[in-house]
Image (cartoon, coloured by chain):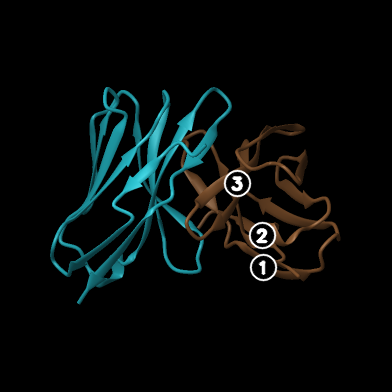
Amino acid sequence: DAGITQSPRHKVTETGTPVTLRCHQTENHRYMYWYRQDPGHGLRLIHYSYGVKDTDKGEVSDGYSVSRSKTEDFLLTLESATSSQTSVYFCASTGTGGEAFFGQGTRLTVV
Amino acid sequence: SQQGEEDPQALSIQEGENATMNCSYKTSINNLQWYRQNSGRGLVHLILIRSNEREKHSGRLRVTLDTSKKSSSLLITASRAADTASYFCATEEGSQGNLIFGKGTKLSVKP
């Protein structure tokens, strides 16, 4: 498997608190993505990055922000967590071939 | 909104039978990809077909792409119980590598 890891793998947080999820890749891939996966919705794109400091919004970006200060790290921040953000979050990266490599996911519960 | 839509949403077959899943999308694409997700795991890339290709094979997988109909199909031949998983199509569009997934087809292969 490509070297892409997410942390933490599981998190329970309270409504209104900020939360940051981290994605780290060792493949020197240019593109990185954050998705959320919910029953009945498949994977929905939150934000993506096409280079250091270059990011753009996806389909469901409200309430989320991202930062990419280094090629290998892509951070997803929930500014003020809400119960609707309870989900499984996946990070992915792609290189020049277009094939995406996924992390193992982060299960986030907002109570 | 999501780009790809898989059909059917769920498919149950016997081991040894062929499984066919379809994907429709809405806009121009650079390429179309298929992924597999085993329960509780991240997605794994199966095959990529570029917009100027019509058919591609990889082992027991056969993918077709019809850009005039904006549709693709994934055929898994001689299915095995280990093929039980969810299958997603993803389309890459634009110049910045925006990768959009559909909702997936849940395949169950009974021994």
Give the residue pinned by disc 1: A9
**Residue B68 or A102: which is nearer the viewer?**
B68
Q: Which residue is mark 2?
A: A6
Q: Residue at x 32, y 41 (%)?
A: B23
Q: Position of residue A103 (x, y in %)?
A: 58, 57
Q: Nearer the viewer, mark 3 or mark 2?
A: 2
What is the chain identity of the residue bearing mark 3?
A
Query: Marks 1 and 2: in contact by CB < 8 Å?
Result: yes
The quadrant of the rendering that contains the C terminus of chain A is bottom right
Q: Are marks 3 and 2 in contact (CB under 8 Å)?
A: no
Which chain is home to disc 1?
A: A
What type is the residue that disc 1 sits on? Arg
Q: Residues within 10 Å of mark 2 (few under 14, many from 20)?
A: many
Q: Residue furthest bottom?
A: B111
Closer to the camera in the image, A14 or A90: A14
In the displayed structure, B13 sits above or below A48; it is below
CA distance separating discs 3 and 1? 20 Å
